[in-house]
Amino acid sequence: MKAVITGDIINSRIELASQWLPILKKILQQFGKNPEQWEITRGDSFQLLLAPEVALYAAFQIKAGIKQLRDLDVRMGIGIGEQDHEASKISEANGPAFVRSGECFENLKKQNLGIITGNPEKDEIFNLLLNLALLTANNWSSTVAETISIFLQNPEKSQTELAKQLNKSQSSLSEALKRGGFDEIIQLENFYRKEIHSL
């Protein structure tokens, strides 16, 4: 089983690519090699192939990274399934995971994050929970997005350590995490990991 995230940057023309491209690349590099596991195509579109259990974590990391730039956001469709054909470039690979990811991405209307696993009951629950999470995540300010991004990238570090690293008070970090619904997003992410194992 694999997960594929198909995405693009919303409002990418507002900002210079030099502003958001390094952020996106840095996050994608954490999850695999280019171009076997990830590629950026058509300027502002990307695909990432990874293990199903970390797909949602990666999606939130990408969102937090991109939303550090005030006018930008990201649209992503996650597909879970098999990979039938492995290729040296992700854009040439295929299988149900790729088909579902593309289909999910194409069907995103009002929402900018969705998932198709091939199990309609699970999809309904996941997408309902994602829609609720996005009520908060879509409104992250750049400060909140930056804080969440750093916490997602350093899960092993404590608030105290990160406050020191960022030269900020622990209370301001704690406040930003609260505004961004960080604890709830981690709960959702844990629930997703548990459920994805039983697919």
Image (cartoon, rainbow, N blue to C red):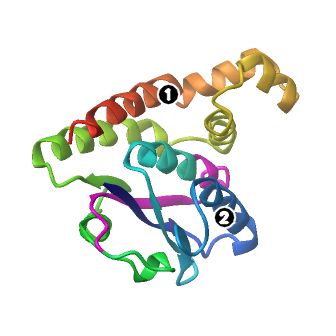
Residue at image coords 43%, 61%? 75
Distance between mark 2 and mark 1 Cα atoms: 25 Å
Helix, strand or loop for disc 2: helix
Query: Label 1 neighbourhood size at 10 Å, few (<14), some (14-19), many (20+)?
Result: some
Location of the N terminus (image quadrant):
bottom left
Q: Is residue 157 above or below residue 5?
A: above
Which three-letter amino acid code belongs to the residue tagged 2?
A: Lys
Identified at 63% across, 61% down, the residue is: 24
Q: Give the mark nearest the N terminus, 2 or 1.
A: 2
Q: Nearer the viewer, residue 174 or 141?
A: 174
Q: Which mark is residue 29?
A: none
In the image, 42 versus 109, the foreground residue is 42
Q: Give residue 103's quadrant in the image.
A: bottom left
Q: Which residue is mark 2?
A: 25
Q: Secondary structure at mark 1?
A: loop
Report crowding for label 2: few under 14, some 14 to 19, many 20 or more residues within 10 A (C-alpha). some
| Place of residue 189 in the rendered image (x, y in percent of width and height, measured from the top left) | 41, 33
Total number of numbered discs in the rendering:
2
Please report the bounds of the magenta region as a residue range.
Answer: 64-84
Dot 1 corresponds to which residue?
181
Q: Is residue 79 above or below residue 192?
A: below
Q: Quadrant of the C terminus?
A: top left
- 38 part of magenta stretch: no
The answer to whether 110 appears left or right of 145 in the picture is: left
Is residue 82 on the magenta stretch?
A: yes
